[in-house]
Image (cartoon, grey):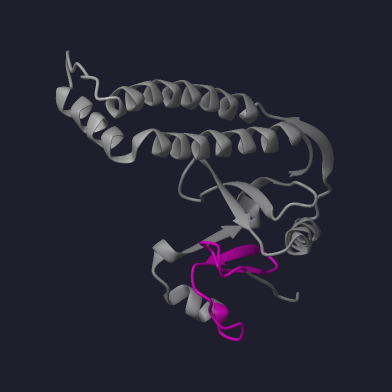
Amino acid sequence: MEKKFFINEDAWYKKILVTEDAIYLSHNLLSNEKFIEEFEQENSAYKLKIYFETIYKFSHIPKSKEVEIEYKRITEDEGEDENLEFVHEKDSQDFTNCLAQRMNLKGERGKVGHKNWLMTGGIAVVLSAITYALLLEARMIENGEEIVIEGRRKAMKRMIVWVLDLIGVTGVWIIGGILVGLCLLATYHYFKIRNYEQEVFKK
């Protein structure tokens, strides 16, 4: 059976090989001709071999660049999972089709939901409150008012006052605004995909 290679230089596993009975994942860009030979000589920290017989589930979100594989190590009872990243959507779809064909599995599509947008939204609210509190202190420092440092962790509080004195009100606005803005963007992104379609292959 023909060997199928996939390459992504930006991922941890830069080169993936699918054979008739296993998936080879390598951190290094080994040559196609001597891939398995060079793979066996690699440090174990930079490679992973997953036999088809140990895979009990893999899933792919259509039009995404990732495929998640769930399997059991031969020497262990506990399950493991690997999230493989590809350069193009077509590559992830080709990998999914190749794996399904060689394992003789048919996929099932279904809706999957998550609530990540609630978490990022909550973080945005907390950061907004912290930014507001720091703005009040920064204005007090700018106006020459005395900041009373009491209670525990005085060293940390003095450090915060020193930073606020250094960056001023404008700095707090900029840094706080950027952080809150990023959280709001993430919230919008997660909210859009809170319900998405996933193709799942099970034994």
Q: Residue furthest bottom?
A: 33
Instruction: Let me know if residue 18 is in the magenta part.
Output: yes
Res. 78 visible in picture = no
Image quadrant holding the C terminus, namely: top right
x, y percentage for residue 41?
Answer: 42, 76
Nearer to me, 13 or 156: 156
Looking at this view, name the residue that lies furthest to the top.
151
The front one of 103 and 165 is 165
Give residue 67's position: percent from left, percent from top: 68, 52
Which corner quadrant holds the N terminus? bottom right
Is residue 172 shown in magenta?
Answer: no
Q: Residue at x 70, y 75 (%)?
A: 3
* Number of marks: 0
Q: Residue at x 17, y 14 (%)?
A: 150
> Residue placed at 82% from the left, 35% from the top?
110
Q: Quadrant of residue 56?
A: top right
**Residue 142, quarter of the rendered image:** top left
* On screen, residue 13 above or below 106: below
**140 lies left or right of 169:** left
| Residue 131 position (above or below residue 57) | above
x, y percentage for residue 151? 17, 13
Q: Which residues are magenta?
A: 8-35
Q: Is residue 84 above or below residue 17?
A: above
What is the quadrant of residue 165 in the picture? top left
Between 44 and 84, which is closer to the camera in this rendering? 84
